[in-house]
Image: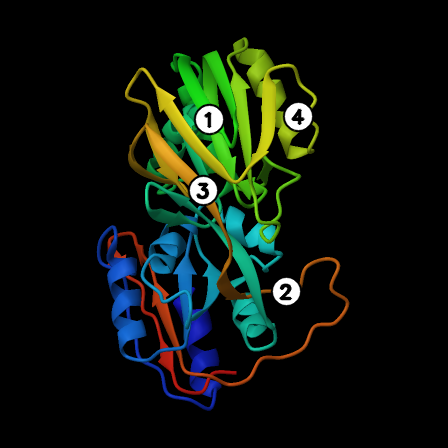
Amino acid sequence: MWQQLEPLLRMGRGKYRVHYTRYSGDGTNIAAKLRADGAELIVGVGGDGTLQEIVNGIDLKKNIFGIIPAGTGNGFRRSLKIPGNAVKALEGISKWEPRQIDLGMINGYYFLNVVGFGLDAAVAKQACVDSRILRGYPAYVGAFLTKLARFNSFSLTVQCDDAIMHEENTLLAVISNGCYYGGQLCVAPQARLDDGRLNLSIIRETKYLQTIALVVRAFFRKHLSHGAVNTAPATELEIKAAENIPVHIDGEIKGSLPAKIKVCPGVLTILAPPPVEAAVQTGVETQPAALINRTEGGRPFPAWRSDHFR
């Protein structure tokens, strides 16, 4: 991918420097250093996990964020209608106006797209392993089929704003800011990144083939009416389980329950296509920028810093 992007950057009118992540959490450290150095536009290249690391290091009051998708599922970019093609995404960064979108926060840590518990987290962990062989949608399908046959349901208690929900036979629970994750899976079709709320989805345990059929329905946005699915909008949630249930944040395993979650309305400024209801799309002004790229296959991907990027 970098072989495609670097010539385009060299053709631009500004200078750039290379940065890259070296280990888990390094995106946060690099972003914090870049903001201290005065970068205004910070662009991440990677999947949702890499991008949320970067967001946790930027200055939300001063920095503008941009993304070039290069991960396994890339659900966040789908919710924003950002092209999956890296070159088109790079070109879009020079054209799109900044937008204000929501972030979620779990136990003091920002997330971009979704957090999940139970089977969801087990699948996310397995998909990261499988991504060395399979990418995108196939990686998640393979992980799902493998883990579903072995996963045991669990008891979950959720305080959702002023209501308390309890489910004895929970298969998975997802808190969504965006509507897509795990490739093209539309877990929360009603979710919007700028509506000031999150969306809770709890899936109860069903038979193996019934669960597979339910997931297929989710690809076509037809799952919400299924009897095993409970959904609710929320601004604040507290989630507990009697067992040690793992948690994934934007596809990265990070700890376990309990969790306190809330929406942070309109705190992230991002370069992205306008919302569907917006009729006009215009360009952005030239501004200082820094791009952070992920590590792939144990080798560092480069990243750029530019004083004039267009």
Instruction: Name the residue that disc number 2 marks.
Output: 273
Residue at 49 percent of width and 35 percent of height: 175
Element under label 4?
loop
Label 2 is placed on what type of residue?
A: Pro
3 or 2: tag closer to the N-terminus: 3
Residue 179 image position (x, y, % from top left): 59, 42
Q: What residue is pinned by disc 1?
A: 159
Q: Distance between the residues labelled 4 and 2?
A: 28 Å
Nearest to the observer: residue 142 or residue 220: 220
Of residues 146 and 309, the one nearer the viewer is 309
Q: How crowded is mark 4: few (under 14 residues within 10 Å), some or many (20 or more)?
A: many
Q: Mark 4 points at which residue?
A: 223
Within-10-Å neighbours for mark 1: few <14, some 14–19, many 20+: some
Q: Which amino acid does label 1 sit on?
A: Gln
Q: Where is residue 195 in the image (x, y as percent from the top left)?
A: 62, 50
Which quadrant of the structure image shows residue 218? top right
Picture layout, residue 67 above or below residue 259: below
Callout in the foreground (2, 1)? 1
**Label 2 vs 1, first from the N-terminus:** 1
Q: Distance between the residues labelled 3 and 2?
A: 25 Å
Report if the CB atoms under discs 2 and 1 are less than 8 Å apart: no
Whether residues under marks 4 and 2 lie with C-beta atoms below 8 angstroms apart, the answer is: no
Q: Nearer the viewer, mark 4 or mark 1?
A: 1
Alpha-carbon span between mark 4 and mark 3:
25 Å
Check disc 4 and give the amino acid type.
His
Q: The N terminus appears in which quarter of the rendering? A: bottom left
Q: Is residue 219 left or right of residue 164?
A: right
- CB atoms of marks 3 and 1 within 8 Å: no
